Amino acid sequence: MTPVVLMSTSTIILLVVIAVLVAGLAFLTFWGNKQQKKAEASQQQIEAAAQPMTMLVIDKKKMKLTESGLPKIVIDSTPKLYRRSKVPVVKAKIGPRIMTLIADEKVFDIIPVKQEVKAMVSGIYILSVKSLRGPALTAPPKVGFFKRMKNKITGK
C-alpha cells in the first residue's frame, strides 16, 4: 500500500501561483529578447540610411505627434496608441526648405535654437548633432523641482 500525501488547499494554490509566475517570467524574458533584437535591427537600418546635413535650427519643442506638423503619411503610419504621446520636434531650414524633423531623445536637449549645426539625419529622424561654429554642444544642466520653485519665487 502506498502512503497518501495530503496537501492543503492553500499549498495547492501557492504552487499554482508560483507556476504561473514562473511561466509569465519565462514568457516575458523570451518576448523581451525578441523585441530587443528587432530594435537593434531597426537601429542598424536607421544608421545605415543616415546622411550628414547642415541645418539652421529655427525652433524645437515637445509636442503631440498629431499637432507636430509632420506629413500625414507619417502620422497615419504610427500606431494609434503613440499618436497622442509627445515627441521631440525640431523645425529646421535645410537648404532652401523648412522641414519638421523628429529628434532622438538623447540629442534633443543639446540641439541649439537659432544656430547652424551639422546633423546626421535618417529620413525625418535626427540621430546626432555637432556644432558647426563655436564651442562643442553640451546639454544644459537639469534643474530640480525645488530649485525650479525657488527660482519662480525669487523671480530669476
Image (cartoon, rainbow, N blue to C red):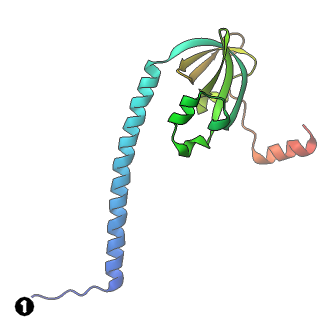
Q: Relative to 132, is 121 above or below?
A: below
Quadrant in which the N terminus is drawn: bottom left
Helix, strand or loop under label 1 = loop
Quick one: 146 or 126, which is closer to the camera?
A: 126
**Image point 37% across, 64% down: which residue?**
21
Quadrant in which the C terminus is drawn: top right
Q: Which residue is mark 1?
A: 1
Q: Relative to 68, is 28 above or below?
A: below
Q: Position of residue 75 (x, y in %)?
A: 57, 34
Q: Position of residue 78 (x, y in %)?
A: 52, 37
Q: Give left or right: position of 65 versus 10.
A: right
Q: Give left or right: position of 140 versus 4.
A: right
Q: Position of residue 73 (x, y in %)?
A: 54, 29
- Taking the view exactly as shown, the residue that stands out farthest to the right is 154
Q: Amino acid at mark 1?
A: Met
- Crowding near the residue tagged with mark 1, few <14, some 14–19, many ≥20 C-alpha atoms within 10 Å: few
